Image (spheres, coloured by chain):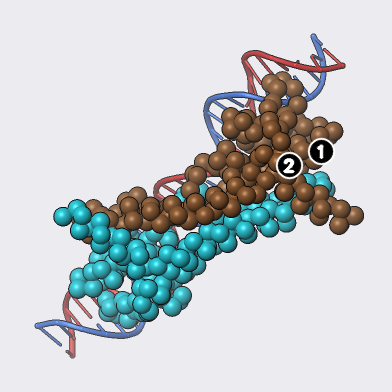
Chain colours: A brown, B cyan, C red, D blue
Amino acid sequence: MKYSYRLSDGVHILAYISIAPTASLSSTSIAASIEANPSVVRKLMVELKKAGLLTTKNGSAEPRLARSADDITLLDVYRAVEASQSILHVDPRTNMQCPVGANIQETLNGVYDRVQQAAEQEMQAITLTEIIDGIQERRRQSL
Amino acid sequence: MKYSYRLSDGVHILAYISIAPTASLSSTSIAASIEANPSVVRKLMVELKKAGLLTTKNGSAEPRLARSADDITLLDVYRAVEASQSILHVDPRTNMQCPVGANIQETLNGVYDRVQQAAEQEMQAITLTEIIDGIQERRRQSL
DNA sequence: CTAAACTGTTACTTTATAAACAACAGGTTC
DNA sequence: GAACCTGTTGTTTATAAAGTAACAGTTTAG
């Protein structure tokens, strides 16, 4: 498959708005920073808005964080933009006539849930502030 | 992308060999349990063999676990068969002329690594024995 | 000893998801 | 009202995975 960059691009959008609030914040400008298509950026922004992370203004390029960067976690962005919501996927088509095929799906669901929760717990511990600070720190060091 | 069922199918192969050692263990029989293509199963088995989880015999259907099911973790199978090895993916193409685009990749790599480690730690705690027991338990309850 | 079955391998096709691209109706700003 | 913007729809392209086919060489059974 083609890998999804939705989470990375979603974070990029929020970080860009936070870091460069004086620059143009049109979907075209943000897309130039990501090197993505403005339409893709607009679609992601709609998802971020639905999730309550972003406010926008139809017709005008004035996106703002809907709440403090301290209060936005990687998990929030993940849930907002990722289509799948699961990092591991149980094969949905196994032979139900076979003892293994009939019972492996539920079993794997159980263990995959544990992996998912571990990943989500770590994602919840990472704030947008932390990511913004990381970008700013690297920026300073490269000057 | 199309979701990968390689991990699920890899576990299925190992579990099938453990649970049904008296049945035919040909790639065709295993594939019938997974409802997958025998060729796909053979390719996965080659990966499992390379990773030291499975022994096979060319020309004869006698696959065996290379070590105790207690000593095989979900992480072992994940590393053996998954092409990507990463659950999250940093967008590799951002604008290096932009302060955000130039520094977000490294920053995200750092935080994604933490999420990856949390997930892998949990995967390492899940053994093939545990999965086999889960399948057997469900099997008993459905009789 | 040979026929059947199997593995290991290669090559090609199909399918599924995401991103790129294009276009436009309607809102906003100056 | 001209320029720019968002929100939205639809189409195309790229890519990873699975399906399919084929076959050389190995093993096993009769």
Where does the image place residue C4, in percent across and percent down from the top left? 17, 74
**Image spot of residue A139 (x, y percent):** 83, 52
Q: Earlier in the sequence, mark 2 or mark 1?
A: 2
Label 2 – label 1 distance at C-alpha:
8 Å
Q: Chain of mark 2?
A: A
Label 2 sits on what residue type? Ala
- Quadrant position of residue A114: bottom left
In percent of width and height, residue A97 lies at 20, 55
Q: Which numbered dot is residue A15?
A: 2
What's the residue at 42%, 60% (across, down)? B6
Graded by Cα atoms within 10 Å as few (under 14), some (14 to 19) or many (20 or more), the crowding at tag 2 reads many
**Residue A84 location, x and y as percent?**
49, 44
Q: Please name the residue shown 90% across and 55% down the image.
A: A143
Do we see residue B13 in this rendering?
A: no
Front-most of residues A25 and B128: B128
Identify the disc placed on residue A20: 1
Write down the quadrant of residue B40 in the picture. Answer: bottom left
**Amino acid type at mark 1:** Ala
Label 1 resides on the chain identified as A
Q: Residue furthest right?
A: A143
Q: Report the quarter where the C terminus of chain B lies.
A: bottom left
Under circle 1, the secondary element is loop
Instruction: Check the image and report above or below for A41 versus B36.
Output: above
